[in-house]
Image (tube, rainbow, N blue to C red):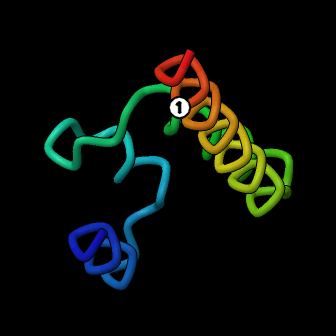
Amino acid sequence: MVAVGRRLEQGEPLEAILRDPSIGIPEAYRVVVEAGLRSGRLSAALEDVACCARRSAETRRILSLA
């Protein structure tokens, strides 16, 4: 994220930074961020991703206990 921040400070668009394979952003995350930027609802998109990640982790935890 430090590299992303530096590049943003240099004026590079976030979409271009996230497409750079050297950054290592997963495709699914990149697509969500791009959709959030296009819609003007980036924070909502990121909150949805975080919620899904939490649910997925909880489901894995429950299944491992079963």
**Which residue is outermost to the bottom?**
9
Residue at 64% across / 44% down in the picture? 54
Please identify the quarter of the rendering in which residue 11 is found. Answer: bottom left
Q: Which residue is mark 1?
A: 61
Q: Is residue 22 above or below residue 47?
A: above
Task: Give 24 or 11, whichever is nearer the viewer.
Answer: 24
Residue at 51% across / 37% down in the picture? 29
x, y percent for residue 60: 53, 25
Q: Secondary structure at mark 1?
A: helix
Q: Is residue 2 left or right of residue 38?
A: left
Q: Is residue 43 left or right of residue 57?
A: right
Q: Residues within 10 Å of mark 1 (few under 14, many from 20)?
A: few
Question: In the image, what residue type sits under mark 1?
Answer: Arg
x, y percent for residue 19: 35, 38
> Which image quarter is the C terminus in?
top right
> Which image quarter is the N terminus in?
bottom left
x, y percent for residue 65: 52, 24
Please identify the quarter of the rendering in which residue 5 is found. Answer: bottom left
Q: Is residue 17 above or below residue 32?
A: below
Q: Is residue 37 above or below residue 61?
A: below
Q: Is residue 52 left or right of residue 23?
A: right
Residue at 38% across / 47% down in the picture? 18
**Which residue is outermost to the front?**
66
Residue at 26% across / 80% down in the picture? 6
Task: Give 46 or 6, whichever is nearer the viewer.
Answer: 46
